Amino acid sequence: MFTTNSIRQGDCLEILPELPARSVNFILTDPPYIVRYRSRDGRTVMNDDNDSWLAPAFAEMYRVLARDSYCVSFYGWPHADRFLQAFRSAGFNILGHFVFPKRYTSTTRYLRYQHECAYLLGKGFPAKPESTIGDVLDWTYSGNKLHPTQKPISALLPLVETFSRKEDIVLDPFAGSGSSLVAAKLVGRKYIGIEMNSEYHAIASKRLAEGS
């Protein structure tokens, strides 16, 4: 049974079906990028080696999102085609695209990779925000101490504030260390999180209890 202001440990494909249709107001999530990521200290991300979860997860996210509401999803640019296909197959409209320039290099191969990116999606046609934001947003290094792909709360706060309202329910089915849920809590939103990895679930639960 779901309650707001909580995070469940488990597979979102098994847990999301427990949520009623159209029961959340905004989704902010950072799913695996399908790139077999390994951090410098050897940490990995579960299900980052396959895309079998991708289409069914976004189909469930579309189902539980309220009509005429927003979803922001980070994604891995090497497989942008797979993410876009999953978004559109689920029923989402593509409303915009965010770039987050970094002041540091995540990794170096053919280039020095220095940005993150996310799509702004819509279920139906959400009302335009009263005061919107630019599609290039500042990024402060989180240190990745709590999770190998930890997103900075400072980058998530403007997304929550712009695309949801006070007391709305914010969902993150790939919650990681809980940064999106902490951002929601900080600006007066309710939240629901799901995280498969028991270690990161424990970290997120502790952060939410402490409000950090």
Image (spheres, helix red, strand yellow):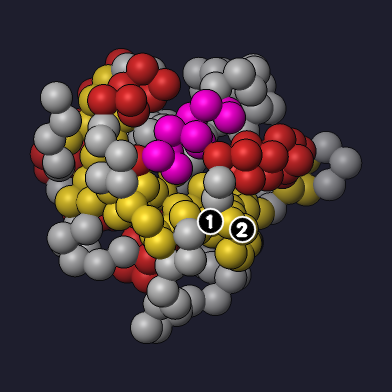
Residue at mark 2 to residue at mark 1: CA–CA distance? 5 Å
Q: Please indicate, yes or no, whether residue 158 appears anywhere in the rendered image.
A: no
Dividing the picture into quadrants, the one containing residue 189 is bottom left
Relative side of 126 to 25, left or right: right
Question: Which residue corresponds to the image point at 83% horizontal and 37% vertical from the top-left?
Answer: 109
Question: Which residue corresponds to the image point at 57% horizontal and 28% vertical from the top-left?
Answer: 54
The residue closer to the viewer here, 62 or 11, is 62
Contact check, label 2 and label 1, Cβ < 8 Å: yes
Relative side of 76 to 112, left or right: left
Residue at the spot of label 1:
121
Residue at the spot of label 2:
94
The residue closer to the viewer here, 129 or 177, is 129
Relative side of 9 to 68, left or right: left
Q: Residues within 10 Å of mark 2 (few under 14, many from 20)?
A: some
Q: Quadrant of the N terminus?
A: top left
Question: Which residue corresponds to the image point at 37% horizontal and 56% vertical from the top-left?
Answer: 67
* Magenta run includes residue 59: yes
Mark 2 or 1, nearer chain start: 2
Check the image and report above or below for 143 versus 93.
above
Q: Say which element carries label 2.
A: strand
Query: Which residues, given as a range, are shown in magenta?
Result: 54-63
Dividing the picture into quadrants, the one containing residue 127 is bottom left
Q: Position of residue 135 (x, y in %)?
A: 58, 70
Q: Say which element carries label 1.
A: strand
Q: Amino acid at mark 2?
A: Ile
Q: Residues within 10 Å of mark 1 (few under 14, many from 20)?
A: many
Q: Amino acid at mark 1?
A: Leu
Q: Position of residue 74 (x, y in %)?
A: 55, 46
